[in-house]
């Protein structure tokens, strides 16, 4: 009797295992699932240590952005408080007027670690890979051991070939941080003394579970910090944007140069577009001639050959400008000074 029961349980377990294998089947219509039309997904992680000082003779309550995680340290390294996506809040310490945040005492200096963790990442939308290929593609994983690649063909008698694959730039700088607007610009008493940290870009070839499909593309620096040092790029970036546009692409495609970089000294630099409108559609005024001319906005570019193994691109940022902290009020620096070098400036 016991042996029959054991046999039944064993057969049931094997059948359940077979079912589990079967139900893991997935279809990847391209695009879909948070990736672009060649199956690449990009996420961004930020981890910064920001030093704050309160120059006022009374305490201030600093409101935090609940999207980030915060650890508040005193100067001696003592952890004063932790705020993790506002999941763990001590009302008497970490709320005021129902806003999440922390207190900073008169003339106190605090170090704040601001980070994005894996449970709350920053998704970066990638551009679609442009091609004259008119057919739709479906990748299907019916079980854990096989893959089906299906091309929905359409009647096209005219073309024998659709060109070649080359590393198109699918990601340009997406986020632009400066001390005045992104860090602390609403209170003249609470100052940013310095910050330093690490930025990580994670690239994944989502449908490529078994390493069968390769992708070739280029990505640029995802986030820029105004007036800060950008260094320690890992892996080493392939080239600068100007090299990519003026040298690499014309050489790779054997075409005449038709690409131009934007001259910051002549036009307004806009991260999202080159028009005179913001994303909201509001008109913006032309800025004055910067004191320090930046002939062209240049940033690192990586040429990526991606398989099933994700690629991490890391770099460091640092800003220490305590001499520019004004107790009366701070003004925006007109010159954009970027140190985007292959070498560590230190």
Image (tube, rainbow, N blue to C red):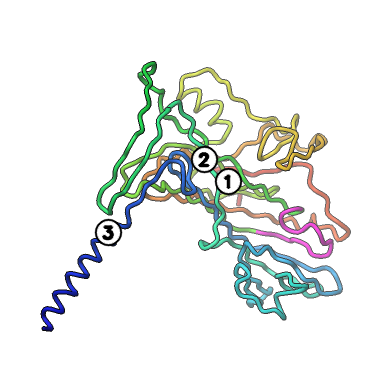
User: Regarding mark 2 in the picture, which secondary structure is present there?
Assistant: strand
Q: Residue at x 61, y 53 (%)?
A: 317
Q: Residue at x 40, y 30 (%)?
A: 135
User: Regarding mark 1 in the picture, which secondary structure is present there?
Assistant: loop
Name the image quarter holding residue 133.
top left
Query: What residue is disc 3 on?
Result: 21
The region drawn magenta spans 181-195
- Residue 259, horizontal then vertical, whole percent: 59, 24
Query: What residue is disc 2 on?
Result: 219
Report, in whole angstroms, how far the alpha carbon at label 2 lies from the one at label 1.
8 Å
Q: Nearer the viewer, residue 102 or 289?
A: 102
Q: Residue at x 72, y 74 (%)?
A: 95
Reply above or below: 322 against 313: below
Residue 77 visible? The answer is no
Reply above or below: 191 against 37: below
- Compared across the picture, whether 60 is left or right of 248 comes to right
> Of discs 3 and 2, which sits in the foreground?
3
- Residue 90, horizontal then vertical, whole percent: 67, 79
């Amino acid at each position: 009797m016991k042996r029959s029961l054991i046999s039944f349980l064993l057969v049931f377990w094997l059948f359940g295992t077979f079912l589990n294998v079967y139900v893991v089947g997935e279809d990847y219509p391209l695009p879909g699932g948070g990736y672009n039309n060649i199956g690449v997904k990009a996420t961004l992680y930020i981890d910064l240590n920001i030093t704050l000082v309160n120059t006022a003779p009374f305490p201030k309550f600093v409101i935090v952005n609940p999207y980030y995680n915060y650890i508040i340290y005193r100067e001696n390294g003592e952890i004063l408080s932790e705020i993790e996506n506002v999941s763990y809040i001590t009302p008497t310490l970490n709320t005021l007027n129902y806003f999440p945040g922390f207190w900073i005492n008169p003339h106190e200096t605090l170090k704040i670690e601001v980070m994005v963790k894996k449970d709350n990442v920053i998704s970066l939308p990638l551009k679609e890979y442009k091609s004259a290929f008119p057919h739709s593609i479906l990748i299907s994983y019916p079980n854990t051991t096989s893959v089906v690649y299906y091309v929905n063909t359409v009647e096209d008698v005219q073309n024998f070939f659709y060109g070649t694959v080359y590393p198109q730039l699918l990601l340009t700088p997406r986020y632009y941080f400066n001390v005045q607007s992104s860090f602390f610009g609403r209170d003249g008493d609470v100052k940013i003394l310095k910050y330093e940290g690490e930025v990580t870009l994670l690239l994944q070839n989502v449908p490529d579970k078994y390493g069968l499909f390769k992708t070739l593309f280029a990505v640029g620096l995802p986030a820029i910090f105004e007036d800060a040092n950008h260094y320690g790029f890992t892996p080493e970036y392939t080239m600068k944007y100007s090299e990519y546009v003026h040298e690499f692409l014309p050489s790779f495609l054997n075409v005449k140069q038709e690409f131009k970089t934007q001259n910051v000294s002549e036009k307004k630099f806009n991260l999202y577009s080159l028009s005179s409108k913001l994303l909201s559609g509001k008109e913006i005024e032309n800025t004055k001639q910067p004191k320090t001319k930046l002939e062209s906005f240049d940033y690192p570019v990586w040429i990526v050959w991606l398989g099933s193994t994700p690629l991490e691109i890391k770099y460091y940022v640092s800003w220490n400008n305590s001499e520019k902290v004004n107790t009366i009020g701070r003004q925006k620096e007109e010159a954009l000074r970027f140190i985007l070098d292959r070498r560590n400036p230190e």
